[in-house]
Image (cartoon, rainbow, N blue to C red):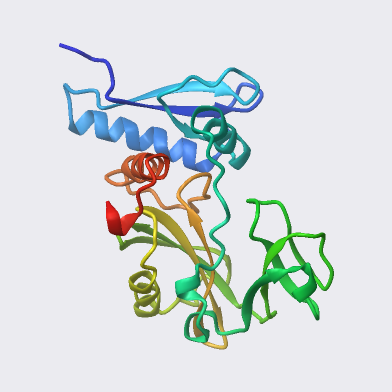
Amino acid sequence: MNNKPLTTFLLQKIDGEIKHDFSFTLIESINYQNWINYPTNIFGISHVELDDDLPPKHIPIGSVEFVLEYLKKHFNLFPKPKNIPKELMSFEFTGRKVINGTEKDIIETSFVKSNDDIKKFTEYCKEAPIGNYQISEIIEIDSEWRGFVFNNELVGLQNYTGEFDLFPDVRQIKKMIRAYKSAPIAYTIDVGISKKKTVIIEVHDFFSCGLYGFSDHRKLPFMFLRWFYNYTHNINYNNK
């Protein structure tokens, strides 16, 4: 019997410990998958610190910096922020004015997020360094939720801040998913509730994303795996 795993996830450790919620949940999911597929050991786990050498042919799981370093080293790839994709920029989905521009287009205090680099610049401001930004009118949001999307289907929805009993319009979220034609195979879609209307906040590729309790062991490993494979092979949902 060959017990060598078909796929190995490379989990980041920080000071010798696993720190991220998605890493803990992924370990549980891997144990579940290997149990139901016994005797085939389909998934394996390896660990590494950020400063260690990053071995090839693994699926990196860790901080944004950790995954970006892996993609840079082994694939010379540099993921950009998704923010609000162009297909979802209509007022129907945003509930506010949102534009893509530069620092020169910030004319009043706005929510400003870099379109150049993930986690580079996110501020409420009316001035920003030279760069490309998504500039959003500020609105009051009472509750924020993270949707989990795989194969163009909403597979989970978790509250992460605000009023947990103020539930979003799932039909509106599914409408956003249908409209997002250039979507990756797996991603998160953050939405908020503002004046009883469900509006998009932003979209994230499926890596280094807080799960906030999402723990579908049937799907989670494949969401990480398929996103990574499709991204490194330049495949999106619609040309899979």
| Image quadrant where one finds the N terminus | top left
- Residue at 57% across / 38% down in the picture? 68
Give how far across and how far down residue 87 sits, in percent.
Answer: 45, 73
Give the residue at x 79% y 72%: 104
Q: Residue furthest bottom?
A: 195
Question: Looking at the image, which is closer to me, 30 or 230?
Answer: 230
Position of 22 compared to 38: left or right? right
Quadrant in which residue 83 is drawn: bottom right
**For this view, does 116 lie left or right of residue 213?**
right
Viewer can see residue 151: no
Q: Position of residue 88 (x, y in %)?
A: 47, 74
* Residue 20 drawn above or below residue 151: above
Q: In the image, is residue 97 above or below residue 5?
A: below
Q: Is residue 108 above or below residue 236?
A: below
Q: Which image quadrant is residue 64 in?
A: top right
- Compared across the picture, whether 135 is left or right of 186 comes to right
User: Residue pushed farthest top?
Assistant: 1
Identified at 50% across, 82% down, the residue is 90
Total label count? 0
Q: Is residue 182 visible?
A: yes
Where's residue 102, x and y in %? 73, 68
Question: Which residue is more in the foreground, 29 or 63?
Answer: 63
Picture layout, residue 11 above or below residue 162: above
**Camera-side residue of 229 and 210:** 229
